[in-house]
Amino acid sequence: MRTRSIVLAVICLCAIAHAQTNFAERVVEHRLSNGLRVLILPRRQSPTVAFYILHRVGGVDEESGRTGVTHMLEHMLFKGTTTIGTRDYEREKPIWDEIERLRDQLEAERARGDAADRERIAQLQQREQELLQQVSQWLIPQEYDRIFERAGSPGTNAWTSNDVTVYTVSIPANRLELAAWMQADQRSHPVWRQFYQERDVVLEERRQSVNDSPEGALWEAFMATAFLVHPYRNPVIGWQDDVARLRTADIDRFFRTYYAPNNTWLAVVGDVDPQQTIALVEKYFGSIPAQPLPQARIPAEPPQRGIRRVVVKMPANPQMLMGFHKPNAPHEDDVVFSVIQGILTRGRTSRLYRELVEKRKIALSVSAYSVPGDRYPNLFVIDAVPRYPHTPQELEQAIWHELNRLRTQSVTEAELKRMRTWAEADILRALRSNEGMAEQLLWADAVLGDWRELFRSVERVRRVTAQDILRVAKKYLHKDNCTVAVLEPAPEAK
């Protein structure tokens, strides 16, 4: 068994070394004059290409009172452009302008609260519906996705996080120019069609994922308790009242500020020729003008000076979150936490799984991870679900026992070796597909500052020692740096 483990470790080391050398030789880096950063990785395994765009903007960059604007913008960018999604943009535009004027009046009347004229509100809403019916004759719903589907793409996707916003599409290699044109047009001539209808969609999404979701409500309360001033406390989907107040002007201003090419990364991975790809990117993205980026004024989270607790009561099974403030990558202590995470909860031999789930049988599940982003100091979180009839309080006591062990006793060399093997396997797994490669390249380059950090992180894991874990556990994993959130079952409201 020991011989087999050594052989597997050697194979992983060789594979990582080969991948690192292979990447260093094959990744082509290019920067357009407008600041757009391009990473190209030729890969001939199949005649397909992953075309990924990252904008270095997320929930953390939003203004107070306008949370959710990043996520809303992600939704809106798929509504089309002046040439996509319309039969005649010149005819539809005046109708959208009139709808916006109506919304000015409608929002102003609603803002009067109890003094609002309900009859006038009804009249304005009726007129808006008439205009929406009128403009529908010029719209081609979901044309953006359908164009890609007709070209052989499995579809487009996008996601917004606290740190970044990413847009993805995978296409046949011979449709690379289509992807370049479509994505550039999306960023050059967007049209904010059906904004208020989409705002209602997002509000319903929030209702389902937070307001009516015990796990979502617990998470939102947990983050708002752990972070007092840093915008990591805000939900990416936005606070409900903020989203309900968003206007097209907010979306447009945010788009023109943060979707500038000098705040944008593009990764092209697959069956491509680098020089031809650069020529296409220059052709379609080169004319988009750079913009001055605003100076970040994000407040630093003050040191925590005592344990914080929050309880959420909803009709659901109990759950518990424990969070500890920690540095973000690539700080030397961050990588130690990735090893601690594995030692505590990764696999059936991990400490918390073995103790809470298998031995004492007081937990259904336990996991650990770092959230909510990597651009700023974040949280190391332990997430546990008790097994009936045991309670979150029992879990908390058992977890503190294991954390105190980390603070006072050295981990074994076998545990460290296992974590090194996991780290190496993780990076190989992530880089197996064009899509995984594109995503990892963008994240490392835009958030960590250099795509080569992908492999440096594996090297850092290899250098973590038992003394490093003792030092980091003593420094961060204590009660004065801890926030505990508990989901308590409550009867359904009648």
Image (spheres, rainbow, N blue to C red):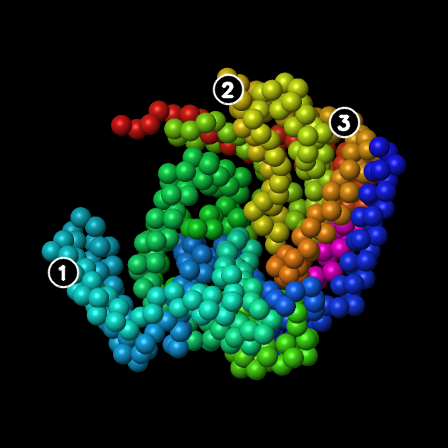
Q: Residues within 10 Å of mark 1 (few under 14, many from 20)?
A: few
The dominant secondary structure in magenta is: helix
Q: Earlier in the sequence, mark 1 or mark 3?
A: 1
As drawn, which residue projects farthest toward the left?
119
Q: Regarding mark 1 in the picture, which secondary structure is present there?
A: helix
Q: Which mark is residue 388?
A: 2
Residue 52's spot in the image, x, y percent? 58, 64
Q: Residue at x 59, y 77 (%)?
A: 281
Q: Which mark is residue 123?
A: 1
- Quadrant hosting residue 20: bottom right
| Of the pair 242 and 390, the residue shown nearer to us | 390
| Of the pair 237 and 275, the residue shown nearer to us | 275
Q: Earlier in the sequence, mark 2 or mark 3?
A: 2
Q: Amino acid at mark 1?
A: Gln
- Mark-to-mark CA distance, 2 and 1: 55 Å
Q: Residue at x 83, y 48 (%)?
A: 11
Q: Regarding mark 3 in the picture, which secondary structure is present there?
A: helix
Q: Regarding mark 2 in the picture, which secondary structure is present there?
A: loop
Query: Start and end of the magenta stretch?
Result: 450-459
Left or right: where 236 falls relative to 174: left
Q: Nearer the viewer, mark 2 or mark 3?
A: 2
- Quadrant hosting residue 364: top right
Q: Nearer the viewer, mark 1 or mark 3?
A: 1
Q: Residues within 10 Å of mark 3 (few under 14, many from 20)?
A: few
Q: Nearer the viewer, mark 2 or mark 1?
A: 2
Q: Amino acid at mark 2?
A: Tyr
Quarter of the image with the C terminus is top left
Residue 125's spot in the image, x, y percent? 19, 59
Q: Amino acid at mark 3?
A: Thr
Instruction: Kindly check if marks 2 and 3 are in contact, taking CB atoms under 8 A apart as contact.
Output: no
Residue 425's spot in the image, x, y percent? 73, 47
Quarter of the image with the N terminus is top right
